[in-house]
Image (tube, rainbow, N blue to C red):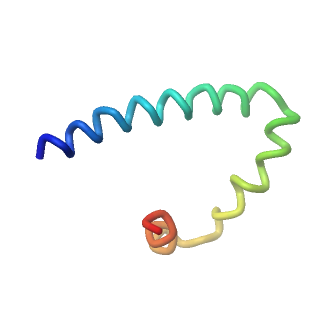
């Protein structure tokens, strides 16, 4: 149980440290947004059940 907390305790700050600056760049630089939009929008039409399977691979 303690290792689960340690993994979550280290994974969440790491994910935030990557996602927040990346989101700020995507939101403020239109060229980067246009370049990344196709990759981000690709899985949008997939059902959530399929995304769970895809994420676990």
Q: Position of residue 21 (x, y in %)?
A: 61, 26
Quarter of the rendering containing residue 22: top right
Residue at the image point whose x is 28% and y is 41% from the top: 7
Q: Position of residue 39 (x, y in %)?
A: 73, 55
User: Residue most toward the front?
Assistant: 3
The relative height of residue 18 versus residue 47 in the rendered view (above or below) is: above
Q: Is residue 4 left or right of residue 39?
A: left
Residue at the image point whose x is 40% and y is 29% from the top: 13
Compare residues 15 and 27 and report the one nearer the observer: 15
Q: Is residue 51 left or right of residue 38?
A: left
Q: Is residue 51 left or right of residue 5?
A: right
Q: Position of residue 41 (x, y in %)?
A: 71, 57
Compare residues 45 and 13 and report the one nearer the observer: 13
Q: Position of residue 57 (x, y in %)?
A: 47, 68
Please state the total of marks drawn on the protein image.
0
Residue at the image point whose x is 13% and y is 40% from the top: 2
Residue at the image point whose x is 33% and y is 33% from the top: 10
The relative height of residue 28 versus residue 9 in the rendered view (above or below) is: above
The relative height of residue 50 versus residue 34 in the rendered view (above or below) is: below
User: Residue most toward the left?
Assistant: 1
């Amino acid at each position: 149980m303690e290792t689960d907390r340690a993994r979550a305790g280290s994974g969440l700050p790491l994910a935030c440290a990557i996602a927040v600056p990346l989101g700020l760049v995507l939101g403020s630089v239109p060229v980067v947004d246009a370049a990344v939009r196709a990759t981000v929008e690709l899985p949008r039409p997939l059902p959530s059940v399929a995304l769970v399977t895809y994420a676990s691979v």
